[in-house]
Image: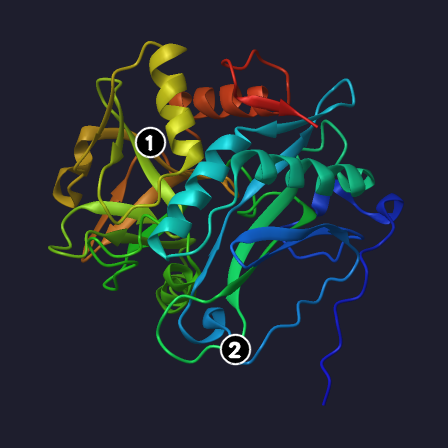
Amino acid sequence: MTLTSDPKAKNPQELDWNNLGFNYMNLPYRYRAYWRDGEWRDAGLTEDANVTISEGSTSLHYGQEVFEGLKAYRCKDGSINLFRPDQNAKRLQKSCERLMMPQVPVDMFISALKQVVKANEDYVPPYGTGATLYLRPYLIGVGGNIGVHPAQEYIFSIFAMPVGSYFKGGLTPTNFVASEYDRAAHKGTGASKVGGNYAASLFPGKLAHDAGFSDCIYLDPIEHKKIEEVGSANFFGITKDGKFVTPKSPSILPSVTKYSLLYLAEKRFGMETEQGDIYIDQLDHFAEAGACGTAAVISPIGGFKYGDHFHVFYSETEVGPVTHKLYDELTGIQFGDRKAPTGWIEKV
């Protein structure tokens, strides 16, 4: 039996830009390059959404694969912004280093992104809809392998799709629950963007959804006393004295959004910032809290259930003022409405 490929996406004129959701679409073009004999080759755009690989590929058996996520933004003047793509390129390189894979040069990464966006430009959502073009770069180990060792060949690819809000309701507080499961091991691959971390989160995420929560909050894998991540996003809190605090741990993915918020909180709004421990028995120190990441941008956390306790931060129905201010500043920069720090915006 041959599995059929996904049908091509609708004509862009038929899309409801205001109600896209966060779903895969088979756009006309994607970028692909191949690593063989110590170099990248055969790089360019293709219309083929299918990837044919050997049954012995290390990506299938040993999880030797890494990926990234970032967006292209339509500005008011019709131009298109990429937000800090060099940071995604460098994070991909770190993930590759951890999994013993060849690195994609930063200039090759950014060039590939621009090629994909330009080729699919009609699918970059209009300014004012809040929607964006999501870009998914990935790198997989391929070829006939069976021993537990790095592959000899690799495929690097980038595909794209227009997306709306990751969480239904957009910038609206939702509730989360502490998970008894670990997202990643201490000093494991938590700081790398690898598929295994996300596979491990599927079951605890389902348990959270079944219990009526948006997702689960993962605690530190050693003692289960400190907050680490919120589903597939980073956590941040605003203390009652106005400090921006986010967890620090070797098993947390270094979010480009989180580091951007840290910068904006300090440089734009004069807030004190800190990366450190956030204990679940000290949540009353915080006036607001949220999850942040490329897909969600910011998702305000209304309440957090851990054990028999249920802690409400600012409100279960209203967004806190500092969270809203940070969201407006960050998205304003991304869509070109506010001045960006030097080097943050790459024009397509």
Q: Which residue in the protein does label 2 denote? A: 144
Between 226 and 286, the one lying in front of the other is 226
Q: Amino acid at mark 2?
A: Gly
Quarter where residue 81 is shown: top right
What x and y, as percent, mark residue 191?
A: 32, 48
Q: Amino acid at mark 1?
A: Tyr
Residue 152 drawn above or below residue 229: below
How far is disc 2 from disc 1 in space, using C-alphas? 54 Å
First in residue order: circle 2 vs circle 1 = 2
Question: Position of 108 compared to 304: left or right?
Answer: right
Q: Residue at x 73, y 27 (%)?
A: 127
Between 190 and 310, the one lying in front of the other is 190
Between 315 and 238, the one lying in front of the other is 238
Q: Which numbered dot is residue 314?
A: 1
Q: Residue at x 23, y 45 (%)?
A: 250
Q: Residue at x 42, y 68 (%)?
A: 63
Which residue is the extreme one toward the bottom? 1
What x and y, as percent, mark residue 245?
A: 26, 28
Circle 2 packing at 10 Å, graded few (<14), some (14-19), many (20+), is some
The local secondary structure at tag 2 comes to loop
Q: In which quadrant is the C terminus drawn? A: top right
What x and y, as percent, mark residue 15?
A: 81, 47
